[in-house]
Image (tube, helix red, strand yellow):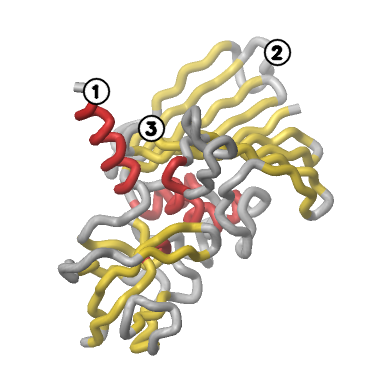
């Protein structure tokens, strides 16, 4: 039984990074190049625009990996405009990417890709007009594509939690870079975080914590995305901000809070 569970975990971990065959959307701002061969130096055959729906094909061979912006992806065979070649799947997402001119936060994005499944569910203690140190309000919204949005308010504290079924941590990173709400978390040119560190950016002190299973990470020398369980990022800018991103079964969970 333990062997079966371990094998299932290994398969799930691989699937969280390598995209299975099927339809996906191009989430690279400048589009994706189709190359003649699975090689970054190979001839470019065509450019697939941002937001295009594309189907990956079974090429009958072993996938070749490639590291871009800290992410580990694979060269995948596709056909576009009657040209067949290879693209990097790190910039493919299961849902259409945000409309860059209009989408400002994750809540708007969920409204772009799906419709609410029923009314909001609101639970509270106290009133929001005169909230006290012990008062709070929690709002939950389920969407027809299985996504969820949870909004929490308390005294001098707020938090948003998003559940994105079918997304991987790397796909979540690419998505967050496209949404202005997370511009202080992941800048447009920031790389995918593979190790824990502290640094200063735009006058703010940041701390990134990359969590891996016991025995992995710094002790084992493993710095690949495959073993990451959770990414935490915190910084202060008037308030204290906390960001978390992790997998819960087949869902990506994104948590973003602010408080004093």
Q: Nearer the viewer, mark 1 or mark 3?
A: 1
Query: Residue at horizontal 20%, vertical 68%?
Result: 61
Give residue 100's position: percent from left, percent from top. Answer: 51, 65
Q: Which residue is mark 3?
A: 248
Q: Upstream in the sequence, badge 3 or badge 2? A: 2
Give residue 244's position: percent from left, percent from top. Answer: 55, 36
Q: Upstream in the sequence, badge 1 or badge 2? A: 1
Q: Nearer the viewer, mark 1 or mark 2?
A: 1
Eyeballing the image, is 209 above or below 79?
above
Q: Which residue is mark 2?
A: 133
Number of the label disc, if any, that sits on residue 2? 1
Cβ–Cβ below 8 Å for labels 1 and 3? no
Q: Upstream in the sequence, badge 1 or badge 3? A: 1
Left or right of 257 in this view: 91 = left
Query: Residue at horizontal 61%, vertical 63%?
Result: 188
Residue count near mark 2 (Cα–Cα under 10 Å), binned few <14, some 14–19, many ≥20? few
C-alpha span from label 1 to label 2: 47 Å
Residue count near mark 1 (Cα–Cα under 10 Å), binned few <14, some 14–19, many ≥20? few
Q: Give the structural element (helix, strand or loop) at label 1.
A: helix
């Amino acid at each position: 039984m333990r062997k079966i569970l371990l094998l299932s975990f290994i398969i799930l971990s691989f699937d969280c990074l390598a995209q299975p065959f099927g339809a996906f959307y191009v989430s690279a701002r400048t589009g994706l190049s189709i190359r003649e061969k699975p090689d970054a130096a190979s001839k470019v055959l065509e450019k697939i625009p941002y937001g295009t729906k594309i189907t990956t094909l079974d090429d009958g061979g072993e996938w070749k990996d490639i590291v871009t912006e800290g992410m580990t992806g694979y060269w995948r065979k596709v056909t576009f405009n009657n040209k067949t070649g290879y693209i990097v799947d790190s910039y493919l997402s299961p849902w259409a990417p945000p409309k860059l001119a209009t989408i400002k936060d994750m809540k708007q994005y969920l409204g772009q890709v799906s419709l609410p499944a029923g009314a909001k569910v609101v639970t509270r203690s106290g009133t929001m007009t005169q909230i006290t140190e012990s008062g709070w309000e929690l709002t939950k919204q389920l969407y027809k594509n299985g996504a969820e949005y949870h909004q929490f308010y308390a005294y001098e504290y707020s938090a948003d939690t998003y559940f994105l079924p079918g997304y991987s941590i790397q796909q979540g990173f690419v998505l967050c870079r496209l949404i202005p709400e997370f511009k202080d978390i992941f800048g447009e040119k920031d790389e995918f975080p593979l190790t824990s560190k502290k640094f200063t950016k735009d006058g703010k002190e940041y701390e990134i914590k990359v969590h891996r299973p016991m025995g992995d990470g710094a002790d084992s020398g493993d710095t690949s995305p495959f073993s990451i369980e959770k990414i935490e990022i915190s910084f202060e800018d008037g308030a204290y901000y906390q960001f978390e991103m992790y997998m819960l079964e087949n869902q990506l969970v994104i948590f973003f809070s602010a408080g004093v």
